[in-house]
Amino acid sequence: MIKVVILGAGNIAQHLYRVFEATEEIKVVQVYNRSEKALQYFKNVATTTSLKTLLEAAVYIIAVSDDAIASVSNKLPFTDRLVVHTSGSASMHVLHKKNRRGVFYPLQTFTKGKKVDFSTIPLCLEAREKADFTLLQTIATAIGSPSYKISSEQRRALHVSAVFVNNFSNHLYRIAHEICEANHVPFHILHPLIQETANKINTLTPYMAQTGPAKRGDEKTINDHLAKLDTDIHKEIYTLLTQSIAKTYGREKL
Amino acid sequence: MIKVVILGAGNIAQHLYRVFEATEEIKVVQVYNRSEKALQYFKNVATTTSLKTLLEAAVYIIAVSDDAIASVSNKLPFTDRLVVHTSGSASMHVLHKKNRRGVFYPLQTFTKGKKVDFSTIPLCLEAREKADFTLLQTIATAIGSPSYKISSEQRRALHVSAVFVNNFSNHLYRIAHEICEANHVPFHILHPLIQETANKINTLTPYMAQTGPAKRGDEKTINDHLAKLDTDIHKEIYTLLTQSIAKTYGREKL
């Protein structure tokens, strides 16, 4: 059985705790958090607000905000143990070198209170020592997640890519929601289209899946759309993304 | 049984033909197309390249490119029959008024050769006469599609919204694909995140579902991401969408 200590009590800490507890192979022996209050979520496990009282474990998973990773890892009262963080953007070297370092980054958007299915969540793993990497792989396998060996540099690329496909796509949904509301159309009419757009890339590359007036070079429709948009920022976004698509498909003049 | 003539032989014409043929209630009696070649797809149905030989039907569905709708409808050799088009952006009034007019717009992205499930495709219906609207509703119900009464003005709003959630989101996937390739990371690691981003809006509004550095006002991560991006257009898109998200959540200074 692999003993794990989780440091942090936020979204990712909670999701990891829940999925670890559902396995036979992994035992969360303790959860640390600076403040007592956030620890209320964690039942049936020892908790502590003092790093000095941390229990022994095979791996310490630091699931705190990026800014706090270095400080928590500096203050750990032991050396030469495996310490990993769960951040998409922080380098592995943010962790203090007195311990063996690694990264255990679940590439997914976590919603508080919404159950997640770890069997669909890719885990991006990194470790300096081979045996440590193997241990992280074993943990990934135990919770049913596909895992990948990803360097800090590659992870940064994935993190910025994730902003495009997740944060920015969601913002486009938001803009569509605003346009629908302004025109008294229920936004949910667009749900199937949103689903199919996401599904398509399972069988086609995004390059092949592209459709629409910008790809076709259909200036009349583009101008009609711009005339229909009410706000400057929507027009700006429409124009820039149209130009970018046009460029991708060799229609520079649009 | 409702007799239908389809005018056009492209993507939408083919998908409609296939789904109509699978019903008991609808019979495609003829498919028209200007050129013979494109009609090869349509087996077991009369085809013609001459508008003069069009058969009698309860509804004529014009599924041609937006530019050609007016010209096809002008040339129809009959009057006072129900004629509809399938376009998201063309007004109902593009159709010649010598016939009864309507719109039968399936709001989905169609891929050639990929089977579509009409039970998930919203049909946006419009007609001048109440009886015609009811007929279009009956056809929608026969193929299992949810249908909505949508005016030409509302349909235009939906069409531009569809560009945001479909064309533009797909282009963001494309950008992520480029970033992944440049960093030797398999793009498919992002598939589950893309799926979950689309799924989330079934239970949360896009406004509530938003996460990420722009919403948090996390300037350090934003700057790291901009430094990681290699091309000017990617930086421009990142900056503009970040500003738009920041504005949405009252973080104007970003």
Image (cartoon, coloured by chain):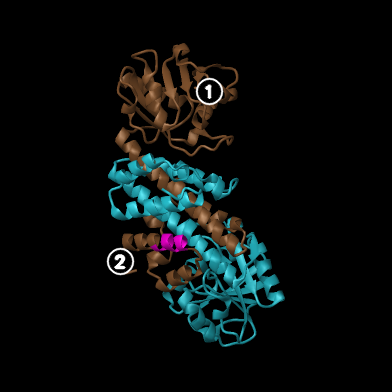
Chain colours: A brown, B cyan
Mark 1 is on which residue type?
Ser
Q: Indicate the secondary structure of the residue bearing disc 1.
A: loop
Residue found at x 52% / y 53%: A174
Q: Mark 2 points at which residue?
A: A252
As rendered, which of B57 and A114 lies closer to the eye? A114
Badge 2 crowding class, 10 Å Cα cut-off, few under 14, some 14 to 19, many 20 or more, is few
To which quarter of the image does residue A151 belong?
top left
Query: What amino acid type is highlighted by mark number 2?
Result: Glu
Q: Do labels 1 and 2 share a chain?
A: yes
The mark found on residue B65 in the picture is: none
* Res A135 visible: no
Name the spot of residue B225 as percent of width and height, x first: 34, 43
Question: Residue lying furthest front in this view?
Answer: B253
Question: Mark number for residue A35?
Answer: 1
- Please provide the residue range marked out in magenta: A232-239
- Examine the structure image and report whether residue B23 is included in the region drawn in magenta: no
Q: In which quarter of the image is residue B30?
A: bottom right
The numbered mark, 1 or 2, whose residue comes first in the sequence reads 1
| In the image, residue A235 above or below residue A150 | below
Instruction: Between residue B27 and residue A33, name the one nearer to us.
Output: A33
Q: Please state, as top left, top right, bottom left or bottom right, where the C terminus of chain A lies in the image.
A: bottom left
Q: Real-space Cα distance between discs 1 and 2?
A: 55 Å
Front in this rendered view, residue B187 or B213: B213
Tag 1, which chain? A
Q: What element carries label 2?
A: loop
User: What chain does mark 2 sit on?
Assistant: A
Residue B150 relative to residue B254: left or right: right
- Residue A209 locus on image (x, y percent): 41, 56
Location of residue A113 in the rendering, given as x and y in whole percent from the top left corner = 59, 34
Position above or below: B241 against A59: below
